[in-house]
Amino acid sequence: MRRAKTIVISAFAANPAMSSETGIGWSFIKVTAQLAMERGLDVVVVMNLRSKGPVDAQLQAEGLDGVVETIGIDMPPGLRVLKKPQLTRFEYVVWWMLAGRVMRSLEASRPVFLAHHVTFATEVFPTPITAFSRRVFKVWGPIGSAGDSAVYKVKPLAMGVRREALTQALRDRIALLPAKAFGRRVDLVVAQNQAVGKIFERLGVRARVFPNVILKPELERAIDAARRLRSDAEDQPSQALRILSVGHLVPRKRFDLGLQALTHPLLENAHYELLGKPLEGVADSLPALAAELGVSDRVVFRGKLPRDQVLAAMATSDVFFHPSGREGASGVIGEATAIGIPVVCFANTGASSVLEEAGTSGVMIPATADLSVSTIAEALLEAARLPRAHTTLWTEARFKNFMQELIAEGMERSITREDATQPQTQPQPESQPESESERSEHP
């Protein structure tokens, strides 16, 4: 029996219950399975073993298990210590080597036409889909954690920022080598942001930007409820400007610049609310900095809050400030653009790429070492005056449309390759009219 054309999804980690990268892995699996069912295709998902159980259960619950085969790869007995969260990157490298063998076996046993690596995807680690031959359309991503080292040179520098500047500068240099090596072995790189996309384009690798932001239906309902909290009377910022930031309180996010901005006369009446907490083992220097700057009475640290309370804070604030220097596709910016709060962030970062894709109100500040507190204060005021425009872009349908395009291109390439490998019959010379002497020889 001839097998159906096959799509291979490479997802190191996937979990339908999560909203982080593992949730993105599940979203790609789900929409690919839906499209495969509509088109009579098969799907094989290669993942780590602990992802297989939740994915199998959800596929069955949604009636998609009939078109999807899942392959879970476990660590060899002597290397199972790598399954600890802090050793995930080492686990991935071992998984990558084992997954490459699976990919070669899959191509030998069925007509694979599209291979898509979705998680764990970064430009500094290899992807197992490069084990497929040139006959398979290979798509890598969304990948990349965009950063701008200039963000960590903006003065004054709070505790830990210099270390982040060095980390980003090293990453900028080191990432080019693996990006060049891995990128040239795939057909398309899907970048989470413009900065990463430009890296591959400079290397001569075809790239496309697709921020992997998705707001699941239950979150969309919470966003709708949060929007209703803001009355028509609050459409303009109040005299006391309300600035909001959300995220881990770590130097990489540069929330210290928000505290510095409060010292400027333009923001003498502004209030700054920070939602989040430091990472375990990381000292929180922001409360001490607020006291040192004399702005503690206008700053509130609310800690980590449930998502519905975060969305409510977005709805009732005037401007969302996200000065993070490095990240992939910023999910919190996706939520802010869905709420409609104007955003201020730095250009050439994961945050700015999501804001650009959303097309909603915001200000992107070019980061330079001589950037002044005045420029940041002016950007916050400018953003707060912008209209509150929200987007409905970040849906599962967007992922499905994207996969439709990849499948169409993969199928087209597959047909072209099949045509190229068909034996060509030699054209027969056209018959020429017989001469009089030739005709006379015939009975």
Image: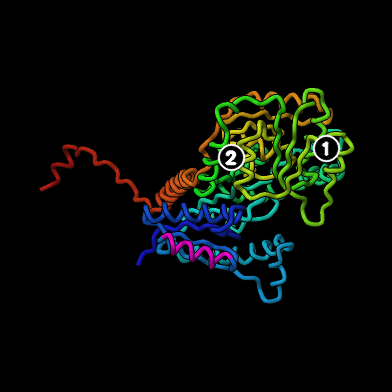
Tell me which colouring the rendered structure shows.
rainbow
Examine the rendered structure and indicate whether residue 227 appears above or below residue 175. Answer: above
Q: Which residue is mark 2?
A: 209
Evaluate whether residue 409 shows in this view.
no
Q: What secondary structure is the magenta-colored segment mainly?
A: helix
Residue 60 is covered by the magenta coloring:
yes
Tell which circle, 1 or 2, labels the residue nearer the N-terminal end: 2
Residue 281 percent location from the top left of the image? 82, 56
Cα gap from disc 1 to disc 2, whole angstroms: 40 Å
Tell me if mark 2 has few (under 14), some (14-19) or many (20+) residues whose alpha carbon lies within 10 angstroms of its own: many
Residue 260 percent location from the top left of the image? 82, 33
The residue sitting at the left extreme is 443
Q: Amino acid at mark 1?
A: Ser
Range of residues picked out in magenta? 51-62
Query: Quadrant of the rendered structure where residue 339 is?
Result: top right
Which marked residue is nearer to the observer: mark 1 or mark 2?
A: 1
Evaluate whether residue 258 shows in this view.
yes
306 or 45: nearer the viewer: 306
Q: Residue at x 51, y 45 (%)?
A: 221
Q: Assign a secondary structure to mark 2.
A: strand
